[in-house]
Structures are given as structure tokens and as C-alpha cells.
Amino acid sequence: MAEEIFRSENITKRYSNHLALDEVSITVEKQSIFGLLGPNGAGKTSLIRIINQITAPDSGTAYFNGEPLNAAHIGHIGYLPEERGLYKKMKVGEQALYLAQLKGLEKAVALERLKDWFVKLEIQGWWNKNVEELSKGMQQKIQFVITVLHEPKLLIFDEPFSGFDPINTELIKNEILKLRENGATIIFSTHNMESVEELCDHIALIDNSKKILDGKLKDIRSSHKSNTYTIGFRGDFAALKKGLDGHKLIEERGDEDLNRAKIRLADGARLNTLLQGVLPHIEVEFCTELIPSIRDIFIEEVKENKGR
Amino acid sequence: MGKITLIIQREYLTRVRKKSFLILSLLGPLLIAGMMMLVIWMGMAENENQKLIVVDDLNPAFSMLKHKSTNNVKFVYTDISLDSAKAKLLESDFTGVLYLPRNVLNAKAAQLFFKKHPSSFVLRSIEKKVEGIVESLNLAQFGIDKDDFYKVKSTVTLHPVLFSESGEEADASKEKAYVGFAFGLMIYMFIFLYGVQVMRGVIEEKTSRIVEVIISSVRPFQLMMGKIVGVALVGLTQIAIWVALTFGIMAVGQSVIYESNFGVDKVAEQMTPEMAKKLEAANAFNTRALIDQSNIIFMINWPVMIGWFLFFFLGGYLLYSALFAAIGSAVDSETDTQQFMLPVTMPLIFAYVMSVFIIENPEGPAAFWMSIVPLTSPIVMMVRVAMGNVPMWEMALSSILLIAAFVFTVWLSGRIYRTGILMYGKKASYKEIWKWLWY
């Protein structure tokens, strides 16, 4: 197993009237993109605030690079909150410089890096603008730069793409990937499941203040496979059914040209047996395994958790 | 410490660079100096010119009045009757008729008929001139030597002298108390002005959501203190600018006023101190005011006064601005602040209102307690400090309590603040704030 950069052990956080986190343990590997998922109000923000040392857990311990989390780690963590903003009446450049210095960066270094970033994102002209003159997406670009400027080892992005157009989303996505290549670890919290599938190596699902799912993205997906296949064929469904032999037809769809059947295999059966059964009756055009999307897994797990 | 310095710097610079700061810095002294000059100017003279017909029943007893004409008041001595003078008054540019009746020497009363009410200053100066003539006429009539008369004439002035362990000291409590009150008023104004700025700053950070980014870099307490100290420095800068500019404008303004009123002021300039006293005794209203003004400047121990002013200003400001910061953290917008503002501003307003009464009774129990209790002491104690007879132990007790109180409110507010700034979208209740204090 790769080296860890962050680990929480049985973290519990209680606010006056509700339990925000209940014995949550996660481990984030170095140079990975860790998806922190969960419905609204599940406790994600509480966990993120603990990682950022904005609040402290009531019980349990958090470790950064193997050491118990402490103030010295602040400079190694970058945080882009979901509820984010800038001083409206302050100049963009000055503000970025100020926030970078608060993270412990030398002024000269911060200035140099900021200039590089402004060139890279082609926003040099914004330096002396007041923040309130910028659009929301533009402000978000600045916030992204501020978050990564001190080159933190651990980056926490909470909904980093909301408010971006597709072009800028792509731009930022590539920057995030580049950051990882250069050695950073990213904790990524979002409701956008497509970007989770695209970016994350590892996910944890928090619901109702408990962690209900945790693992590598591909492991989770394969463990959620339900032995379901889509078969595209010529012929009619009546013919298909003749050869089903215990396998379950879940959904039938089709047009003049081609019919598609969603079939779940009988317990213990394999695709070959299904195909052998139906081949005499229809002409198979294609066959693919249905791998559940993270979206489906999310919904399924949260629903199940509610039933518990 | 490095981070808190950064925060102080930002809070200071963004405020000082604002146009509103510049405007307030320039307008404040103009307003203050303007008001002060208005007061002085009104006390000295209105630039009205009086041209009076003198009707003298004892003709020519008062004929020398025409030599006593000044720039402002011109006497035209006539031998016409009162009725014809009155008739003439209405159809000419004369402003009034000075009527000296036959019994003026005994009754010591004359009449002035006017078209437009003259100022009290002008009335007094006319009065004095007539008085002088009546006096010398009476002296002559009774055969009294002028020098003898002045030896005998008795106008007793009671000079209150404070006697204390530090020795004797001429007392001008009232005047001093007013100076103290002015300082207290300044503290009151600045606490309000800058306390509310702290509160607005906190609300701004909260509503713009930048606070979440900042407190992932610094502790909430650092952010709060940085803001409070930064705004305090803005306040001190403002005071410094105001004081410098006010004195500058006053100096220029005063010389302008004096020049334009040379006729009136000539008297004051040529006066020796003895003469000044005589004049004062003779009830020269205007000169008396001038003398008091210069006296009060020497009677107050300015280094002590300014030292205590800075102490009580900072102490009071820290005490209140911490509370204002806590209020800001507990709400989502400025309109929600009312219910929390009231209990914080009440003692402040109370102290201000009470200090008006304390001028009258600076040694009473109200003055004592209010200058000891930290919430009111910054304002009330200034009145007493100016009067200069506060026992050492009272000063010490008041200062220690103020320091203790601001340490306490800063601690208390820090606890409310760190939770409050992360609570979006709802207005806290007192009950919730109470809970925030304890976890």
C-alpha cells in the first residue's frame, strides 16, 4: 500500500443539537485523488473543517504525514471551500498576495508565483481590478490560484467546478491533474458524479454522519456489479425469452433495427451460459456488461443506509 | 505573531486608503474648527454696524459720546427731541435712538430704541460707554476724586481655590469639566464609529464567505484581534489628523477673525493683566471669555490628560469593539444586529448622558461609581480627570478594572466569534450564543 498523507481515526464531532461525525476513519494515500462524497448535511464539511483545523474533533485523532495534526501543518494544506468568497473592495493582486502570506508564504515568493499563475491562466489584466468587478467564474479562478499558491501537499477542493463554464472546468481539471503529477494529494468533495468517475482514485461515502462506503473507485464499482448485461440483437423479445432459461430480463427496449435487452444472470451463472441459451433464437449484435455508475452506487448506498 | 501583523496591516491599509476616510479626516476638523470659530465669532461681535442718534435731555452732558464712536457703533449727537429723533429713525439709515433721560444720573437707566435687535455684545459696549460717562458726571457732581473713587469702588470676585495635598490650585472646575466632557464625548464618538466598523468588517467577512479561507490559515482569535487592533490604529490616525488639522485651521481662522474685528480686539491686545482684571470685574463679557479660554489651557495638565485619554480611549474601544465583533459574528447582515446592539450600546449612551450631570456634581456617588465601572468609566472618568482631583487609588482601581474587563470581553467575544463566523444563513438567538460560549 502506498504511503498515506492523511488519516483520521474514529473522529466524532458533536454540535449542540446534532451529531455531525460519528466515528469516521479515512485514509488518504499520497498523490491520489480522494473523493469525499455524501448527501447534503451528511458531515463532509465538518470533516473538511477538522482537516483544516478550523474546528477540532470531540474525540478521535487526525494524522498528517503520520504526525498528529497540528498548527505546523496549516501551511501544507490548501483549502477551497464550497462557501467561498473574497474581499469585494480589495484589488485582486493585493488580495491574493495577502491570503498567500497568511498561509506563510514569503511576499517575494508569493509575488513571483502569482505572476506565473496569472500568465498561465491569462488573467494578467485582472491584477489591479477590484474583486467586485469580476464575474463569479473569474473570482473562482482567483480562488483556485490562491488555494494552490503555497504549493500545499494536501489540497481540499469542495465543489471546485461549480460556476465554471465547460472550458474553464476543463482547464481547472487539467491543473488539478498536473498538481497531482507534481506530488500533491487531493481531497475532492463534489456532487458531480461524472467528475468523480473521471478524477478519483479512491472514494469515501459519508451519510448521516457515518462513513458507509470506502475504497478504491474501481474496486467499489466492480463490487457493485450485479451480473447484468445488455444484449443488442435482431429478432423479437418473444424469441429471446425462449432461450432465457432462468436468467432475468429486466428491461426491454428497441427500435425497428435493433432490440436491446437488459438481463441479469441467474445466481452463479456466467455470460457464456446465457449466450449459449439465446444464440439459437436470436442474432446477437453486441453484448456489454453493465457496470454501475458512481451515481447509482451513491443512490443505492444512501437508500440502503436509510433503511438500516 | 507574523500573521496577526499581516491582518492588522490589511485592516489598517484598506480603511485608511478609502476615500471616505480621507473625506472624514478633512471634513471633521473643518466642522469642529468651524463650529468653534462660529462660537468665538458670535461671542465677539456680529459684524453689524450701529448708527445711533443720541438724544440727551441733559444736553450737552453726553456730547463726548460722539468721540467714543467705533467702527461698529457710531454715535451721532443731536439736540433734537426724542419724538423727532424717533420719526427720523424710521426714514433714515440710523439703526437706533439712544435716549438719555433727565434722571439718567440718578436712575442709572437709559433707553435704546432700535429697528433691528442689536446683539448683546453691542448692547453691552454701548452700556459701558454710557456707564463711563454717568460715572464721571456723578463723580464731578458729588465732588469725589476719581482716584479715590476707584480705591473705594468694590467689586468682589470670589476665586475658588482648591486645597489638596498637592497644594493650592486655582479652581476652574466647570471649565475643566467641560474640557473633560469634550474628551469623553470624543471617546464616545470613536467607540461608536470604530466599534461599528469592526462589526461591519466581521459581517463583511462572513457574508462574503472569505472567513472560511482565512481561518484555515489563522486562528479565529487572531483574525478578530487583528481586525480590532487594525481599526484602533485607524482611529488613532484619524484623531491625530483631526487634532493637527483642527489646530492648524483654528490658528489660521483666529488670526483672520482678529484682524477683521480689529476695532473690538484692539482693547484686548493693549490690556495689561491688571487692566484685564479690572475689565473683567467691570463685566466685559467678551474679554472675560477670552481670558478664561487662555486660562483653561494653562490650568489643565495636558500630558496627563492626553495620556489618560489614550488609555481610556483604547481601553474602552477594546472593551466595546470586542463585543461589536461578537455581534457581527452572530448575524448574517447588518439589519439583524439590532437586538444585540441595544444591550451593548445602552451603557455607552447612559455614560454619555450621565456625564452631562456629572459636570454639575463631579464628587457625587454617581460620578464615583460610573468612573469605576468599566462599561462607563472611559467616558465619565475623562470628566473627572480633567478636573484633576481624582484620588490615586480611584484611578488605579478604574484602570485595573477596565483592563480586566477588556481582557474578559475579548475572551468572551473570541468564544462567540469562533463559532459565530461559521454559522451561515441564520440569525443566532441569545440562547444559541450562550451555548457557543461553552463548547
Image (cartoon, rainbow, N blue to C red):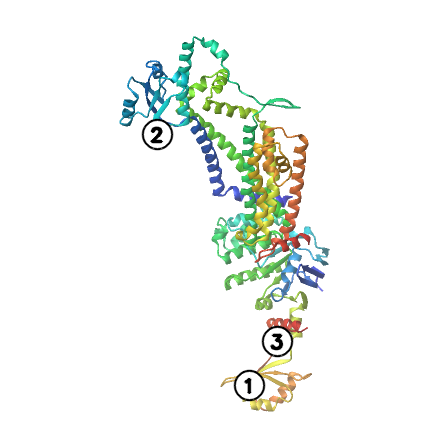
Say which residue label 1 marks.
A233
State the image quarter where residue B392 is shown: top right
Q: Amino acid at mark 1?
A: Phe
**Secondary structure of residue under mark 3:** loop
Q: How many marks?
A: 3
Q: Circle 3 sits on which residue?
A: A291
Same chain assignment for discs 2 and 1: no
Residue B142 on image: x %, y %: 43, 10
At x 61% / y 33%, what residue is drawn?
B308
Q: Quadrant of residue A243?
A: bottom right
Q: Are marks 1 and 3 in contact (CB under 8 Å)?
A: no
Residue A30, compared with residue A213, is above or below; it is above
**Are discs 1 and 3 both within one chain?**
yes
Question: Residue B126 location in percent, x, y?
Answer: 39, 21
- Residue under mark 2: which chain is it in? B
Query: Mark 2 sits on what residue?
Result: B116
In percent of width and height, residue A148 lies at 59, 55
Q: Which of the two marks, 2 or 1, is nearer to us in this view?
A: 2
In this orientation, which residue lies closer to the viewer: A55 or A158? A55
Name the chain under label 3. A
Front one among B143 and B191: B143
Q: Amino acid at mark 2?
A: Lys
Query: Is residue A4 in view?
Result: no
